Amino acid sequence: MIAVLVTLAGALGAVARFAVDGELRHRFGWSTPWQTTIINVTGSFALGVVAGLVTGAGVDADWQAVIGTGFCGGYTTFSTASVETVALLRSGRVVAGIGYATLSLILALASCAAGLGIVYALG
């Protein structure tokens, strides 16, 4: 049953990513990589919250599989961030590519840590 829930949550995460990406492009006229960064940072925050709830608040670990692996796995898109980084590098924008990759990783890690920290502080 958990595998089915993970699958459904993954599908919902992918649809959410598609919707957020489209809305950011439409509303702000952005092209990649900004919307990818926002998606990965918000997904990392959500995963931090889920991990904090499981490890610190006693929430059933199955929820980490469903929401973390399923929804957040479908929502975040680090493979797209990798492709965008390579595209920047291949176009000769080396500083932009390295900066984008570095900033994406730092923001995602900080966001995950913030999610964990908030849950622990409230818990």
Image (spheres, rainbow, N blue to C red):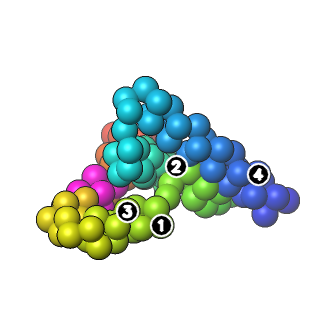
Separation of marks 3 and 1 at Cα, in angstroms = 9 Å
Q: Residue at x 19, y 60 (%)?
A: 96
Disc with the residue nearer the chain's start (1 vs 4) = 4
> What residue is disc 3 on?
84
Q: Please name the predominant secondary structure of the magenta segment in the image.
A: helix
Instruction: Provide the secondary structure element on which disc 2 rests.
Output: helix
Q: Residue at x 34, y 71 (%)?
A: 86
Q: Residues within 10 Å of mark 3 (few under 14, many from 20)?
A: some
Vertical order, 92 against 22 (above or below): below
Span shown in magenta: 101-108
Disc with the residue nearer the chain's start (3 vs 2) = 2
Counting from the top left corner in percent of width and height, residue 105 is at 30, 61
Counting from the top left corner in percent of width and height, residue 119 is at 41, 42
Proximity of marks 3 and 2: CB atoms separated by less than 8 Å: no
Counting from the top left corner in percent of width and height, residue 117 is at 33, 46
> What residue is disc 1 on?
79
Of residues 77 and 9, which is closer to you in this image?
A: 77
> What residue is disc 4 on?
8
Magenta-drawn stretch contains 63: no
Nearer mark to the viewer, of 1 and 4: 1
